[in-house]
Amino acid sequence: MIHEVDEGVRRLLSESGLQESGVEVVFEAPTRDWSARRNAPTICVYLYDIHEDSSRRQTGTTEVYDEDGLVMGWRTPPRWYALTYMVTAWTARPQDEHRLLSQVLRCLARSDVLPPRLYTGTLAELGLSVTLDVAGQSNLGASVADVWSALDGEMKASVDLRVTAPLASDDWPAGPPVTEGLTVRSVDTSAAEADAADERRLRYEELDDPGPEGFTAARPRDLTPGRRRRRGAGP
C-alpha cells in the first residue's frame, strides 16, 4: 500500500506541471550527502512517519462475490494508516525554492482526497477514498526538527503531507456449493452379520421416478439463500 500511495502522490504532483518545468520528484531522504549530489531542481517527498488510525478500525467480515453474484469468500475490513511526508524544494536559490514549494502547496490543497484516477494496485481494487491533510497540525510522530536532526541535513522550509489510506486485508475462500444427493447408511450392530448394512437414501419429494441411478445421482439444485447475493446487496 505504501508504494501505491507514493505513486499516487507522484502522479498528482506531476499533473501540476512540475515535470514540464524540468523539476524532478523524488522520495529519497534529504540528507547532507544527498543534497550535495543534487544537480537539478527537485521536489523531495520524504516519508518519515507511519501511524495506524485506530479510530477507523472495524471488526467482522464482508462477503466477496464473483461476476455471477455467488459468494466466493469472506474478507475482514481494511485497516487505515496515516503516512506523513515532509515535502521540500531544492534549487540554487531560496526564492526559487519558495516558488516551487508554493506550486506544490497549491496542487496538494486543491482537494481533501487523492483523485481516484491516480489509484493503483490494491487502492484501486478497494475503491475507498484516500484522504489528504496538507500542512495540518498533529501531535503524532516526530517533529520536523527531530527529522532534520536525525538526517543530519540542512533544515529548510517544508510542507507536511499526511495521507490516510486503507491497507487491504486477507481473503478466506469459500468451498464450492453442494449440488449432489446425500446417502445415509445405518448399521444394526445387534444383527448376527454386523456388516450387512441397510442403505437408506434421502428422497426428493418433488420427484416420483428417481431414474436409473437412484436418488443419489447428481442433480441441479438451487443454492441456499446464504450462498446467493441478497436482493439489493452491493459487491
Image (tube, rainbow, N blue to C red):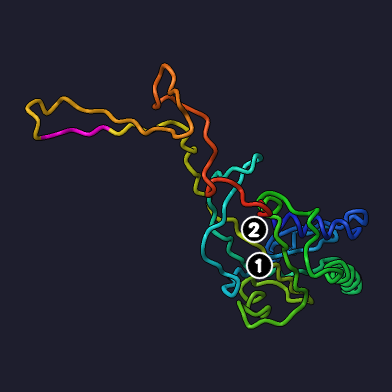
| Residues in magenta, as a range | 185-189
Residue tagged by mark 1?
Answer: 83
Residue beneath the point at 29% across and 30% down: 200
- The answer, for residue 92, to whether it is visible in the render is no
The residue nearer to you, when weighing 114 against 219, is 219
User: Quick check: 143 left or right of 103?
Assistant: left
Looking at the picture, how far across and down is residue 77, in whole percent?
Answer: 57, 60
> Quadrant of the rendered structure where residue 95 is?
bottom right
179 sits left or right of 20 in the view? left
Pointer 2: residues within 10 angstroms few (<14), some, or many (20+)? some
Taking depth in this image into account, of 40 and 98 the one nearest to the observer is 98
In the figure, 207 relative to 56: above or below? above
- Which dot marks residue 26? none
Q: Residue furthest left?
A: 192
Q: Earlier in the sequence, mark 1 or mark 2?
A: 2
49, above or below 38, in the image: below
Which of the 4 image quadrants contains residue 111?
bottom right
Q: Depth check: 130 or 46 in front?
A: 130
Residue 162 shown in magenta: no
| Three-letter amino acid code at the position of disc 2 | Ile
- Expressed as whole percent of the image width and height from the top left, the position of residue 124 reads 71, 52
Task: Return the residue at label 2.
Answer: 2
- Residue 72: x percent and y percent? 55, 43
Main secondary structure of the magenta stretch: loop
Rendered residue at 51%/62% (across/down) = 60
Question: For this view, does 234 lie left or right of residue 91?
Answer: left
Identify residue type, mark 1.
Leu
User: In which quarter of the view is residue 57 placed?
Assistant: bottom right
